[in-house]
Image (cartoon, rainbow, N blue to C red):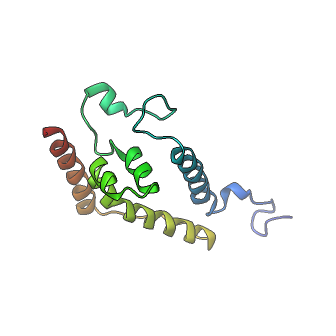
Amino acid sequence: MADAVGGERASPLRHPAAAPLAVLAAGTAGSAYLYVTDPHEPGHLLPRCPFRFVTGLLCPACGGTRMVYDLMHGHLGQAWLDNRALLLAAPFALALLARWAVEGLRGRRWRPRLGRPAQAVVLGLAVAWTVVRNLH
């Protein structure tokens, strides 16, 4: 079939839903692997944090893999200990992903926009969290 505008068939990879659905598929596959792979135990095919590898310090996201594993297994208290900041931010990230997918399925491209003050707050919180968690 020909596209009414360009005369050629539009690629399904250019559809606004392609990227968010690909992210959801990759997230689902990663979650399935993580569900049966305990990141608290060594010897699994899970990536190491490059920041921690180079500096020996915890980055703002360190513990995120363990946090997700613990959440999937119903261990909320342990997830809180793994990474409090990421646990608190996760619902917002999931809401953004859901909005991106819904807008894509409606045929619209959507990109969240953060103003300079919001960017400064996010960066400031990440830096503060990094400092606080490395002081203990």
Dividing the picture into quadrants, the one containing residue 131 is top left
Dividing the picture into quadrants, the one containing residue 24 is bottom right
The residue lying toward the viewer, choosing from 28 and 107, is 28
Quadrant holding the N terminus: bottom right
Quadrant holding the C terminus: top left
Question: How far across and down, in percent of the image, does residue 135 sit?
Answer: 13, 39
Locate residue 100 relative to residue 11 in the image: left or right. left
Q: Residue at x 42, y 64 (%)?
A: 112
Question: How far across and down, in percent of the image, does residue 117 sit?
Answer: 23, 62
Locate residue 21 relative to residue 69 in the image: left or right. right
Q: Residue furthest top?
A: 54
Q: Is residue 103 above or below residue 35?
A: below
Locate residue 90 relative to residue 117 in the image: left or right. right
Question: How far across and down, in percent of the image, does residue 32 sit?
Answer: 57, 49
Q: Residue at x 22, y 58 (%)?
A: 121
Question: How far across and down, in percent of the image, does residue 50 sit?
Answer: 37, 31
Q: Residue at x 56, y 66 (%)?
A: 101
Q: Residue furthest left?
A: 135
